[in-house]
Image (cartoon, helix red, strand yellow):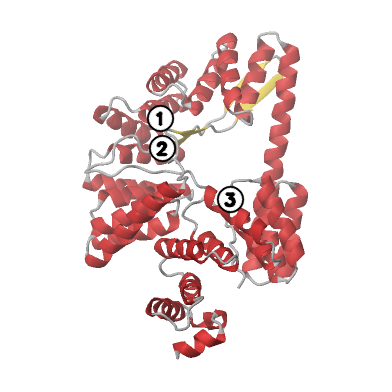
Amino acid sequence: MATLSATLVRKKMGRQSGRGERLLSRASVVFVLLGLLVVTCNAQNTAFPPAELRLSSPPSSISGSRNLQEALSKIVAARGATRLYPNSAAEQFSLGMALKTVGEDEAAAKAFERALQLDPKFAQAWFQQGNASADRGEWPRAAEHFRRALAVDAEYVASHLGLGEMLLRLGEFDQAAKEFTFALQLDSSSAGARYGLGLVRLQQGDLVGAEKEVRQALVLQPKLLPAQQSLGGILVRERRWAEAVTILRGVIARDAGSLEARNALAAALQASGDKERAAEEFKRARELSRQELALHRAQGQYNQGLELWYAGKLEEAAAAFRRAIKVKPDYAKAHNNLGGVLWQMQDASGALAEFEAAAQYDPGYAEAHNNCGTALLQSQDLKGAMQEFHAALASRPGFALAHVNLGRALAVNQDLTGAEAELRRAIVLAPEMAVAHVHLGIVLASGTSTLSNDARAELKEGLRLDPKLSSLIPPQLARELQ
């Protein structure tokens, strides 16, 4: 059975906070500079698009079998606790946090939702729902979630930061400033609150105040790249060219693809008389701008392709994905989903080529690696398939479908112990995944003369969840199940 994974348009920001009686201000917070910084240098007008900040680094990805096993053990324990205490909001929340550690944000969100159904006054769960809404770009909804958290716990610093961020995005600058100020009263070491106040001051035209706040944020968190970029832009507006050049060169050294920093640096260099280097930076900025424009155009075709695919119009969907790729040849998601459409159209070789292209353009794209592995497994390239499944799991350790597929490949390779381990990991991550139960039952029954109780239980559970999977079960095992 071909087990592919599709990609939806979605932006993940990797937020996560630790547990406790109250979440502290070290939660990941994203701010956006909504206004455009415009600088006139001779006859050159340079606009600086919105800058984005991630206050703290995303959660470290889980690597290594030991770390993954520890994470899975926590998920097993959390699931066990939810079965023992089905009416406990705290246990549902613990399950959600355990799922977040392996990157399974959708499953985690469902657990947080169940926690809120059990206890509508669970502040931490409202905060996590606010993060999820923010990640989807649903600013008003996210603001409401953060407000619900604060209605329960008025001293919840992370929720003040989250609400301030949403208000800043929505243009409610005075209210945003109040949230950041309150966060600072609760935690004077909050770099996010300082930077948020800096962005508010900038919107209000107070360059001196903005610079002061941003610099204080950098004292608290010196390597905060978006704050460095914003400081560079402020210095350009203040016509302090030499200082701006120093700051912006440091930003570009860490993020060579920043269009905002390139534009600002070019403007500062031109104003300071270094026209040759300014021209080089403007040229690079134009190329980055061209690439961003191409991406926006390609995304339109990509979204159309998704709609057509969901509507079952495969030929038209393939054409839309190809148009996206023509506009932006390195658009990994378009390659991956074109591969998915071709797979459905029984063009296995064409699908494999697109999956490989997606993985090449985005080596951390777990779904593309999983799909590539599935296609290779069907073509009997066992070694290549396992390499791709391992690559998928290296990027996304909690990817249940990739664990299933790796288990299938190991079973074909006669590594039944390894196959069983992978399939059990998949079931820990996604207990309702019927195909994992069926394949585990088949593995447990391999090499035995009779169907064991464990094998029988897994096969029956898989068929209970999805009766259509009976076609996967070998005839002899199917007869013993009856």
Q: Is residue 305 above or below residue 257?
A: below
Separation (CA) of disc 3 from disc 2 = 29 Å
In the rendered structure, which amino acid carries the disc numbered 3?
Answer: Ala
Return the x and y of residue 43 as percentages of the image width and height: 72, 17
Q: Is residue 380 above or below residue 281?
A: below
Q: For mark 1, what is the residue?
A: 196
Q: Is 244 on the left-hand or right-hand side of 217?
A: right
Q: Is residue 426 above or below residue 235?
A: below
Q: Quadrant of the C terminus?
A: bottom left
- The answer to whether the residues at label 1 and label 2 have Cβ atoms under 8 Å apart is yes
In the rendered structure, which amino acid carries the disc numbered 2?
Answer: Val
Q: For mark 3, what is the residue?
A: 391
In the rendered structure, which amino acid carries the disc numbered 1?
Answer: Gly
Q: For mark 2, what is the residue?
A: 29
Separation (CA) of disc 1 from disc 3 = 38 Å
What's the residue at 60%, 18% (across, down)? 249
Within-10-Å neighbours for mark 1: few <14, some 14–19, many 20+? many
